[in-house]
Amino acid sequence: MKSWDAIVVGAGIIGLSLALELNRQGLRVLVVEKNEPGREASWAAGGMLCDFPAETAPALRELASASAGMYPEFVRELEDASGLEIDLRSVGTLVLSHVETGLRPVSAGQSPATTPAYALPRPLAELEPALRILDGAEHGLTPLFVKERCVDPRHLSAAAIAAARHRGIDFASGDRVLAVEVANGKASGVRTNKTQFAAGMVVNCAGAWAEQIGPHPFPTRPVKGQMLCVAMPEKELVRHVVRTFGRTPDVYLIPRSDGRMLIGATAEEAGFDKQTVPETIQKLRQAAL
């Protein structure tokens, strides 16, 4: 039976990026995916590369900031390896906060490296003329400018898949991993609903499905998010990612370079239900107006 040095369970962007790195280090890698690679959370995500302390758990802030800083090089590597273009935008994010965040805009002489939230580089009306809320003070808002990026996750996933195939990484699609096989206290492969695969290393990158894989399931759960995509009347009508913080409901606008804009998103404890609800979509649209 053919074997590999490492098996990665899950072909989302985390599993794919790990498979690429293991391959770079000389390992023979198999990626096992229960459906089609890159078509679950990585396909549906908004793509905001969050580096906003008020929205990140303290223990994860350093990691999140370091990860966000690595993205341009990561994207360049994927584009070179795949021959595909990835929409990575570095315009920044406008956070319209309705609550006290504990963050302050940078004052003269402060180092941006130690202050992740910044004063608006120009008046809000100049940054985003199409926004209705032009005077934040009148609406109880504190506008913050955050040097964040956003990426089109569908471009990112497609490029990662193409890069992985180009580098000789193997894929097994339509194989749902049931358990990690263990021999003498060490991982020896995986058992799926169809067959078995052998490897000396197994990494569970199954996301919300990770808890379904024995013998040591992870305490993960699915959280459903609904969003809608609209075509802007003109490209760059909105240039920055714009999101509210501390509002009910919060809403974000994510422009794409091709003229689309995403409006999101809900966070629902609804299991693995993927259905969109027209009433919910309408509420998101109204929240964005």
Image (cartoon, grey):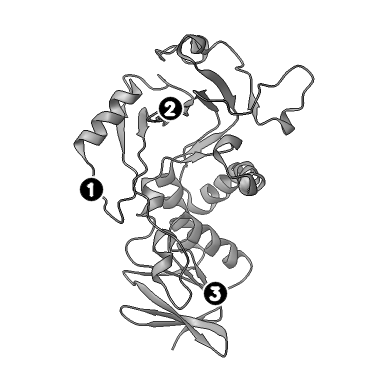
User: Disc 3 or disc 1, which is closer to the eye?
Assistant: 1
Left or right: residue 40 versus residue 185 is left
Mark 2 closeness class: few <14, some 14–19, many ≥20 residues within 10 Å: few
**Reading the chain from its start, which is encountered first: label 1 or label 2?**
2
Looking at the image, can residue 52 be seen? no
Residue visible at 58% across and 48% down? 74
Q: Could you say which is closer to the camera, residue 83 or residue 97?
A: 97
Q: Amino acid at mark 2?
A: Arg
Q: Which residue is mark 3?
A: 28
Residue 119: percent from the left, percent from the top?
63, 19
- Compare marks 3 and 1 and give the one earlier in the sequence: 3
In the rendered image, residue 35, in percent from the top left (x then y), is placed at 32, 63
Res 287 → quadrant: top left
Residue 247 is labelled as 2
Residue 142 in the image: state x and y as whole percent.
Answer: 54, 19
Q: Is residue 90 left or right of residue 85?
A: right
The image quadrant that residue 257 belongs to is top left
Give left or right: position of 54 versus 280: right
Check residue 37 in the rendering and tell me which mark sits there, or answer none: none
- Is residue 193 visible to us here? yes
Under mark 1, the amino acid is: Gln
In three-dimensional space, the C-alpha distance between marks 3 and 1, rounded to whole angstroms, equals 38 Å
Q: Could you tell me residue 243's position as x and y percent?
A: 46, 28
How far is disc 1 from disc 2 in space, using C-alphas?
Answer: 25 Å
SS label for mark 1:
loop
Please tell me how crowded label 1 is: few (under 14), some (14-19), or many (20+) other residues with Cα within 10 Å. Answer: few
Residue occupying the far front of the picture: 100
Mark 3, Cα crowd under 10 Å, few <14 / some 14-19 / many 20+, is some
Residue that mark 1 sits on = 275
